[in-house]
Amino acid sequence: MTTPFAIRRLHAADPDFARHLDHLLSWESVSDDAVNGRVLEIIKAVRERGDEALVEFTQRFDGVQATTMAELILPRERLELALTRISSEQREALEKAAERVRIYHERQKQDSWTYTEADGTVLGQQVTPLDRAGLYVPGGKAAYPSSVLMNAIPAKVAGVPEVVMVVPTPKGELNELVLAAACVAGVDRVFTIGGAQAVAALAYGTESVPPVDKIVGPGNIYVATAKRHVFGQVGIDMIAGPSEILVVCDGGTDPDWIAMDLFSQAEHDEDAQSILVSPDAAFLDRVAESIERLLPTMERAEIIRTSLQARGALILVEDMTQAMAVANRIAPEHLELSVAEPERWLPAIRHAGAIFMGRYTAEALGDYCAGPNHVLPTSGTARFSSPLGVYDFQKRSSIIHCSAEGASGLGKVASVLSRGESLTAHARSAEYRIKA
Amino acid sequence: MTTPFAIRRLHAADPDFARHLDHLLSWESVSDDAVNGRVLEIIKAVRERGDEALVEFTQRFDGVQATTMAELILPRERLELALTRISSEQREALEKAAERVRIYHERQKQDSWTYTEADGTVLGQQVTPLDRAGLYVPGGKAAYPSSVLMNAIPAKVAGVPEVVMVVPTPKGELNELVLAAACVAGVDRVFTIGGAQAVAALAYGTESVPPVDKIVGPGNIYVATAKRHVFGQVGIDMIAGPSEILVVCDGGTDPDWIAMDLFSQAEHDEDAQSILVSPDAAFLDRVAESIERLLPTMERAEIIRTSLQARGALILVEDMTQAMAVANRIAPEHLELSVAEPERWLPAIRHAGAIFMGRYTAEALGDYCAGPNHVLPTSGTARFSSPLGVYDFQKRSSIIHCSAEGASGLGKVASVLSRGESLTAHARSAEYRIKA
């Protein structure tokens, strides 16, 4: 049924290794003029015609029969109903996961602070939540209840008073697990709309959809393109690339476990990337054997095979120090340190979205319920960005309250510097506050 | 010499007030296909030909005679020389400002944290600085030493090992104050390049310019467009719109002071926005009179006049509660609460980049030396974004270290949820860790 398959092998001692690794990691998202044009038209229509345009696009793109926006709104009671329709095992799992995610994210909450200087001048930072956040949830097969928890809970922990969710329902099909997750996560309102039209509605508002301050959540190319276009009007989260895992193993973990960890990333889609690094050549052989043996038993075997063939690799390194260098070069979204003493290597990790330490910490545990967020920086952007968190739903305002004495002293400094920049209104404004 | 001039007056009780205010605030940055095309060509050339292209563009656009990159590098000693070439008054002002900015930003530094659960599972967040930051500084007339301090100091406080600065030198002209500020702020290397070519060099690296992880700092339309294009390859700060001030005054501040505070914003450029809100109609008249009287005495009178005429306003409100509502609608970059008890109104402010409290706290003090950053969210983006800070040069990695017992319990939850999403490799990866 399946063709023979061997995953790519790289050797860090190869003089061409850096070039091979660069090639393996290279990923550029294609910007498509046709998609751009259609998205811009949709945004324009929603800004100009509001609900009317939203209903039209939803009929056309989602095959939904609704003729008014009222039919595209799910009240909170509908979410509560969903919670009764899923199995009690599923409900318990959702509630357990939500509780752990909430507890972890509570630690990220930032508070306002001030300090007072000797002359009575007060400086500080006021931290406030966004007024309203919008959560995009894909419909159909890629509908992930875990993603609802991971996006909505940090917003609620931040204190955002209103979290609005949009989710398309292709041919009218509702996903009860997604609605149940929205209920558990505390989502306030749900609109069954999707695509660029839903992003436009959240950004600019319509008669029925309230405008939000930030839009988060994954989506297809139309959704991602629309988010790029409305950025500035509202905040957005990262535009995610394909998901990736880097497993660093000292050779002491069951090779079947490692193979399955690599599969768990590869099964997402054909562009996902799974890489294993080890200083133990014999162990790499054993993992390769596990991959060949286990692959035919997987429900998503074809996706996994394509992904591993196109973007997967087993990399042999000299030692753990070199493994850390490879990890920092990759700056992976998910990093498993499947080694004996993971805490020993933690300080050497400079760039990673999430670090899964020890042989027991499968990435899948973090994807669903360990507590930390599963929305993580991809494609090496962990070099400069962070997991989605409570801090993404809070913002800061600087506070400056000068005493008369403080203003007089600072006025002299500001006067010198602003005149050095030829900004004399700045200088005179400061000089008014200097005591005679 | 100057034509008679009266600043726009609005009245919050006017039934059309909301519409007038929307119109006054409306601002859309124009995306220009010609600029986009030229920027994309420049980025491509720098990626392909590195230093050679950089030198060519610098000759062409900056009128600089250099023929090699070596001539476009300023060693640290050159920055130290600049510090001896400015006046001692300027040096003291720079050092005083830098010290205050450093002390304030130290408070923003975030630390790593972990907590341990009953079964031994450890969860947390590792906070690390970027490896390398790039600072764009405009050349020529808009060269602001204060901007060097405000962008470089948070990076150094965050612990960024290397801060690289680029600054164009049109016709070879160096700005000693800017170089002195770079010295005081701890900038590590300076390249005298600018424009889209400098942004491309920082993003992708050349033989001489090291690639950075994030690019910050203001620039013209070419620089802003280039930053948008390299986003994803590197992090960028906000793309700033025109600067704005909203002054809320109870009528008790000297109207000349308020007029000058409005001027200090308007003198930046013709698109800058200065708005005053007060419940005291007679006071608004007095400020209008101050504006007319003081305007002809200003060095930048024509810029101020154009800015106030196009985008300025004096707004009469019913009371301070209504003033707060107007402030939150505007979400201003700079908010002066020039009132008797500013702390009373602070909790009512939901959105502002920086809040200047009391009659003595001129915005100009914050622009230069109070301590907080002067890089602030513009055009209403304070609804969802924050001042530039140490947090922009740090990033977080989630830490998950499950004990055997913890992984077993979490594995059961992850198994149920991942099977609900049809991700069975996730499920099997988690199930391997469930104890028999």
Image (cartoon, coloured by chain):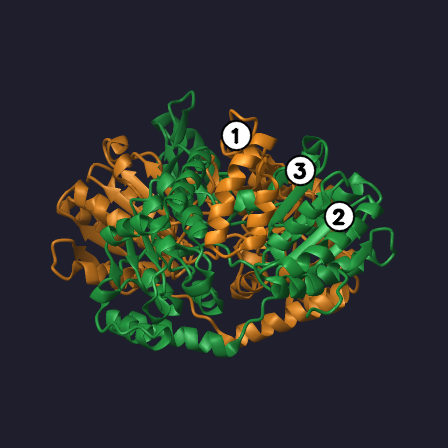
Chain colours: A green, B orange
In the picture, the quarter occupied by the C terminus of chain B is: top right
Amino acid beneath label 3: Arg
Q: Which residue is mark 3?
A: A359
List x then y, in percent, for residue A153: 39, 43
Q: Is residue A326 visible?
A: yes
- The residue positioned 79% from the left and 39% from the top of the image is A321
Which chain's residue wears label 3? A
- The residue positioned 42% from the left and 73% from the top of the image is A39
Q: Is residue A150 left or right of residue A297?
A: left
Amino acid beneath label 2: Val
Tag 1 near tag 2, CB within 8 Å:
no
Q: Which residue is mark 1?
A: B103
- Are labels 2 and 3 on one chain? yes
Which chain's residue wears label 1? B
List x then y, in percent, for residue B427: 55, 49
Q: Residues within 10 Å of mark 1 (few under 14, many from 20)?
A: few
Which of labels 2 and 3 is toward the front? 3
Quarter assignment of residue A10: bottom right
- The residue positioned 39% from the left and 27% from the top of the image is A121
Mark 1 lies on a secondary structure that is helix
Which of labels 1 and 3 is toward the front? 3
Q: Is residue B93 visible?
A: no
Circle number at residue A277:
2
